[in-house]
Amino acid sequence: MDLDEVADELYGLDPGQFTAVKTAREKAARAAGDRDLAAQIKSLRKPSMSAWLTNQMVRTRGDQIEPLLALGEKLRELQASVSADQLRELTQQRHRLVYAVAQEARSLGHERGVAVTDTVARELEQTLHAALGDPDAADAVRTGRLVSGLQYAGFGPLGSATPKPAPAAAPAPKDDLAEKRKERAEQLQKAREEAQEVLDRARASLVDAEEQRDSAASVADEAEQRHHDARDRVDQIKVDLDDAEAAAEAAEHELRGARRAAEAARKSAQLAAQRVRGAEYRLNELD
């Protein structure tokens, strides 16, 4: 067991499991006599909800996160050579893409049984913007071990309102300049296509998640109706049982009365029989 293994395990857990597993790993390190490792494990901080979501997206939705980070690298390379209109268009596209990935993260949180508030979603979007604008932030996101959300101050390639001026240089020959412009236009087009591909995948995932949500809601409604019907049947059975018990009690009372009447009739018949035998005896004596 080393710190990387423990950290990789902890930051892949659900929020409710972090503290218990961290404590267990710390105790194991102490039991093994490695006090330094135990102290390092103890210092690991539980991630915020937005950081946890970012970590899980990196670990389970890398096909959406990595193209986004790669797009940030390309945009930083292109920032000195595109026009203000192009940069604004890329910025808008970046915002749409970040929003789509954030919605996918909401869906992921729902799948893991974790409610994602609007505040957490905004923090996640800020982290993604920071990763797009800052290579160090992008590297931090790639680790899948964020402890808190990241902030981007708005300076640098993705935060500028206008393109950053290129350093002064000797004029290039016309052919070279045309070739460079063509290469930059191709790079820009490729970046747009990659961004659109990521956005399309995110939208498709969102559609799937919404369909699953609607299907689950329909199943829940049907289950609720079945539960309601079953409760109605139980209530009716209880009423029928009460009526049956009352009828049984009345029948028992009637049975007891009938038995008493039968016993009295039996005794009366016995007495009458005795009287008949007595009368017959006296009649015989007279004969």
Image: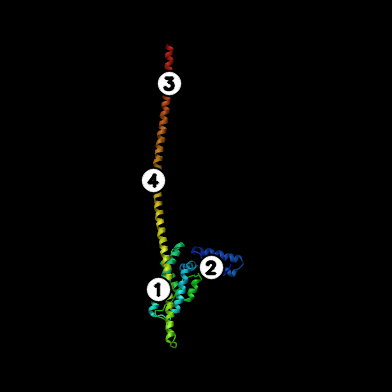
Q: Nearer the viewer, mark 4 or mark 2?
A: 2
Q: Which circle's residue, 4 or 2, is located before the other in the chain? A: 2
- Mark 4 and mark 1 in contact? Answer it, CB < 8 Å: no
x%, y% of residue 143? 51, 71
Rendered residue at 40%/54% (across/down): 222
- 25 vs 166, left or right, is right
Separation of disc 4 and disc 1 at Cα?
61 Å
Q: Nearer the viewer, mark 4 or mark 3?
A: 4
Rendered residue at 41%/28% (across/down): 262
**Mark 1 neighbour density, 10 Å: few (under 14) some (14–19) many (20 or more):** some
Q: Which circle's residue, 4 or 3, is located before the other in the chain? A: 4
- Mark 2 and mark 3 in contact? Answer it, CB < 8 Å: no
Number of numbered tags placed on the structure image: 4
Rendered residue at 43%/25% (across/down): 267
Q: Amino acid at mark 4?
A: Gln
Q: Quadrant of residue 200?
A: bottom left
Q: Amino acid at mark 3?
A: Ala
Q: Nearer the viewer, mark 4 or mark 1?
A: 1
**Mark 3 neighbour density, 10 Å: few (under 14) some (14–19) many (20 or more):** few
x%, y% of residue 83? 39, 80
Write down the residue under mark 2: 8
Write down the residue under mark 1: 93
Q: Which circle's residue, 4 or 1, is located before the other in the chain? A: 1
Separation of disc 4 and disc 2 at Cα?
57 Å
Q: Which circle's residue, 1 or 2, is located before the other in the chain? A: 2
Q: Amino acid at mark 1?
A: Gln
Q: Residue 236: which disc?
A: 4
